[in-house]
Image: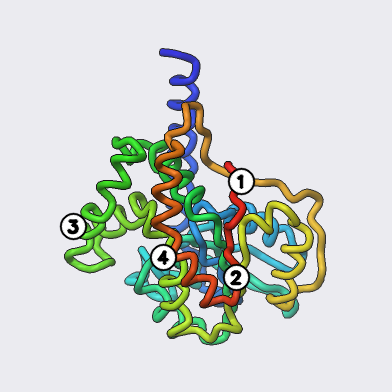
Amino acid sequence: MTAVARRQVTDRLRRGVRAARAWGRAARPGEPGPLPDFLVIGGQRCGTTSLYHHLAAHPRVRVATGKELQYFSVHHARGTRWYRGHFPRLAPDERTFEASPYYLFHPSVPSRVAATLPEARFVALLRDPVQRAYSHYLHTRSYGAEPLSFAAALDAEEERLARATRGGPDTRAAHRALRNHSYAARGRYAEQLERWFAHVPRERIHITRTEDLNADPAGTYGEILSFLDLPAFTPEAFTRHTRRVDDGTSQLTPDLRDRLTEYFAPHNARLATLLGWPDPWAARTPS
């Protein structure tokens, strides 16, 4: 076994241990606490883990028992008492939250959130969808859930998702496919935000680009704190957090990049119109 292969096996084992610990926390909630004041709703592979750590560092914020509780998507049948059991008791000036990137994408989540958290606020990060799609692919492949090449996975995506969701979006098979194999679908941001806007007032959803968080973390973080009515604060460091390590040759070839760019063009235009943005990713920087 090569050194790279050994490192990949070790990384997978570590991820499995972390996932088991997180699931253990999620499966055994404590006494019911308050419902969250705000949620980071996505998107996946858009910097939500980094933002989670930045927000968790704020002295007025206390976090839930885990980053991704997935209550409004995977675990909604468990009920609000189960959900509240993951949040701490708060002092009068403290706030609490969780971050589940699947929330932006799953079609059932906006209506559930609106019914349960009528006063909460929400933060969404959006990344260049071409880069996001490939990062998502590498992430899924890294824990052994993607046997196909990137090109083949893109070719198979539509049929995979359609087959898995025939029984609705809340079956085990649907969650597995929607979370793992939605490489292009998750980059169609406008249709996801339109679902949210149909249930939640737009002024309660703050949307920013991952590229802005990376280029100006202090300024972008400050805007998010202002939106959440949290006092200004600067963490000791704005560290980027990622679970993906790519040791191979990139499969995002120029041809595939062009194919995805063409695919996303109408969806990016729709997003620009929806949000009043210029072309959000006119100048793309390879990851």
Inter-mark Cα distance, 2 to 1: 20 Å
Inter-mark Cα distance, 4 to 2: 14 Å
Q: Classify the position of the C terminus by image quarter.
A: top right
Q: How many residues crowd mark 4 within 10 Å: few (<14), some (14–19), many (20+)?
A: many
Q: Disc 1 marks which amino acid?
A: Thr
Q: Name the residue under label 3.
A: 163
> Disc 3 on helix, strand or loop?
helix
Q: Disc 2 marks which amino acid?
A: Ile
Q: How many residues crowd mark 1 within 10 Å: few (<14), some (14–19), many (20+)?
A: few
Q: Mark 2 points at which residue?
A: 207
Q: Mark 4 points at which residue?
A: 105
Q: In which quarter of the image is residue 28?
A: bottom left
> Disc 2 on helix, strand or loop?
strand
Residue 28 shows in this picture: no
Pick whichever, 250 or 72, lies toward us.
250
Residue found 51% across the figure and 73% down from its top: 32
In terms of sequence position, does the residue under pointer 1 or pointer 4 come before the other? 4
> Disc 4 on helix, strand or loop?
helix
Inter-mark Cα distance, 3 to 2: 31 Å
* Residue 135 image offset from top left, x and y in percent: 48, 44
Model colouring: rainbow
Inter-mark Cα distance, 1 to 3: 34 Å
